[in-house]
Amino acid sequence: MRLILVGLIMTSLGCATRVGSGSISASNIPLSEGYVPKTRISQRECNWRFLGMVPLGAEVGVSDLQERMSRGANGLANIVVENENFFGILVNAHCIRVTATPVTTGGSDAQ
Amino acid sequence: MHSKNALQLGLLLTLAAGLVGFRNVSMSSSASDTPLVRTVESKTRTNATKCSFYALGWIPTSEPTTLDGFLREMAAGTDGMTDITVESSSTNLLLVSWQCWRIAGTPFSWGRPLVAPVAAPAADGSAPVTPDGAAADAAPVAANPAPPEEPAAAPAPVPVAAQILPPPPPQAAPLTERLLKQIGVKKPESEDAFRQLCTEVWNLRQQNKLNDRDMVQLTRSGQGKVAPGSDLMTILKAGLDD
């Protein structure tokens, strides 16, 4: 029994890993001089999966986060996207963090 | 007995796999981290690496480095970076793993505008992006601000503001500093005042088709015609009266 327990713990630890990656972008819309930056914001969302493939909850992508962060502005500038993957024995998580500066273009209304 | 052997073998394999570990590398690139709305003056290309360590694959041993934080650290003191390459490598062993960011980029400072800048003030009071991009950098950066609960109201239409004063060309600042030094006057502490002075000096030079040597000569001759302590523009204009 003790051996099984040790085996399970070792297996869990052996499988628990994380992998990260990231990218940078100047903006998600074409910008010319005169745009107005707002306060820089950051949002993070995680998508969980059971046994690597069964989604637990609605999936949220980078575009969903960007759309949410763009509300009240025309677009985003100085965008940094970070991906983080956690692989456990039973569940996997894929987390996305988007950090950006919402901007409004001069003289036009935000959508 | 067979099951015990199988379990031991499984355990050994897991351990071996964990000790051998694995490494994952990814890469991305970007033209710039800031919208390039004007020409830029590139500085020396730079690169740096920063790693975060995790115990048992997921417990951070110190505050993990975020890509955004690292990028801002690297771009500190400049207006932004161009030609950016981001490499991410994750190495996982049984007990410890680490993830490293490597950023290579060329820092820049703003040069001349690409088009005549026209900006409107924001409805929320934030400043438009100024010719030197200061407003974008000056905006407070919250570490993890709460997401907006509901969409902010769209800013009301505002009248287009007066044209922003474009920055003087790059040569204007050293020239103005040299002329100030010559008459023994300190460079204005306010960046705006200095930029304004540089623009005036440059305009005077352009209007009268003067070169650097002419400007120095003008300062010398003008200095003798005005009261001690007069400002640079007064001296230059007095020099022009000849």
Image: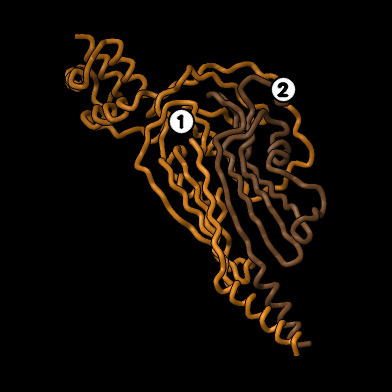
> Is B124 on the left or on the right of B87, as rendered?
right
**Looking at the picture, does residue B121 appear above or below residue B187?**
above
Q: Which chain carries label 1?
A: B
The residue nearer to you, when weighing B218 against A33, is A33
Relative to A39, is A107 above or below?
above
Residue B149 percent across, percent down from the top left: 78, 42
Task: Classify mark 2: residues with Cα within 10 Å, few (<14), some (14-19) or many (20+).
Answer: few
Percent position of residue B166, x then y: 44, 21
The residue pinned by badge 2 equals B156
* Residue projecting furthest to the bottom: B1
**Secondary structure of the residue carrying numbered label 1:** loop
On the rendered structure, is A108 left or right of B210?
A: right
Query: Which one is in front, B27 or B144?
Result: B27
Mark 1 lies on residue:
B132
* Type of amino acid under label 2: Ala
Judged from the image, the secondary structure of the residue bearing numbered disc 2 is loop
